[in-house]
Amino acid sequence: MWIGNSMLFNWLDRNLIKSAGDPPLSQGRIYMVHSGAFYEVEKKLLAPGELPAQLHWFKWQNGITWMSGVALFIVVYYFNDAAFLVDSAVRDLAPSVAISISLGSLFVSWLLYDMLWHTLGEKHGKLASALSLLGLFGSAFAYSLIFSGRAAYMQTGVLIGSMMTGNVWLRILPSQTQLIDATKNGKPQDAVLSQRAKQRSIHNNYLTFPLLFIMISNHFPAAYGHAYGWLVLFAVMVGGAGVRHFMNVRYAGQLWLAPALGMAAVAIAGLMIVTRLKAPEKVKITGPVSFARAQEIIIARCASCHSRHPTDKEFPAPPSGVVFDSAGQIAGMAARINERAVKTHTMPFLNRTKMTDTERAELGAWISAGAKLQ
């Protein structure tokens, strides 16, 4: 509902029609048809003392989204000794240290972002935008050097969501409250307050598509588990924000189709091209690898989770129903093993069983030779 409201109100702002006979405080109106009737919507400032008896606010959709999202992030990534947050292959951190970095970076990032737009945003918007993007990309890259690949994506999403929520509750709603108070007290409204609130609302609008991707990114191990996962995330964020931009400006009569397709191509490149770039091989296997050796690796490194009765306490049932109890089950999942264990290194989960680069290369050699049961 929060994202839908954001898109709706930005769409309304870009489709309002101003007429010569409109009152001075009117900013335009629009007619729409839906559910068997016509709607007339007008955006305007109110004269002093003109506040209506009923005024609808759109704030709790954001509040509930953020609170539930952060609660889920805490449960999944902070509980159980931060098992999903820390990957020793990336950075061997104590759970308390990793959680402190995660939380601390959110507060520091908001303070820097808010101070930047409070000092430079009104007069030097392009510079503030460039510095904001640099800060966002820098944070995402830093997270990739600290947390597990999956957690780095989610941490970036929590960062974006927290900034958007800070904009709503600390900048947009206070501005609206001041506008309402001025109207109640019979004072003229300060248009600057409205402009400042709109500026932060536009920020939230552009961050919507990148945040949506991050929210479901755990389903894309080829992205977060890639050696250049941070670059994939950059491409998706730029592409998503770019597509949103041209969806916005097209209503102003500007050329939009070709640039929109170009920015969409950036996002697609991130998912479809960059994810296929191969990281340098750490170990190269020259001779054949037997099934017996492949099965030995699977049993030692994967069966603690992927068996009918897992021994890993974090997974009382085999994840995704994948079981490696028999030779046929292992051979049948060869393509998936190749994708997750050999190419992206996203399995074993956070490499809890310490699968070595040599073992990954051996599995890759066995699969490349046809995954034969001999």
Image (tube, rainbow, N blue to C red):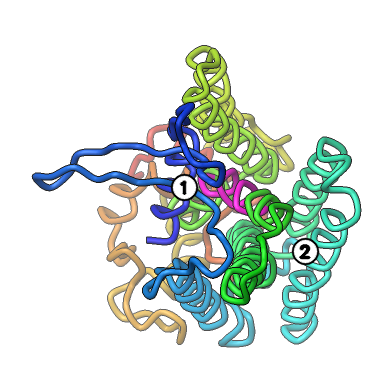
Residue 235 percent coordinates (x, y): 63, 34
Residue lying furthest right in this view?
119
To which residue does mark 2 refer? Answer: 146
Three-letter amino acid code at the position of disc 2 = Ile
Q: Residue at x 12, y 47 (%)?
A: 35
Closer to the camera, 137 or 338?
137
Q: Which mark is residue 175?
A: none
Closer to the camera, 187 or 339?
187
Three-letter amino acid code at the position of disc 1 = Lys
Nearest to N terminus: mark 1 or mark 2:
1
At numbered mark 2, what does the secondary structure look like: helix, strand or loop?
A: helix
Residue lying furthest left in this view?
36
- Mark closer to the observer (1, 2): 1
To which residue does mark 1 refer? Answer: 43
At numbered mark 1, what does the secondary structure look like: helix, strand or loop?
A: strand
Q: Give the range drawn in magenta.
A: 200-209
Residue 338 percent coordinates (x, y): 47, 44
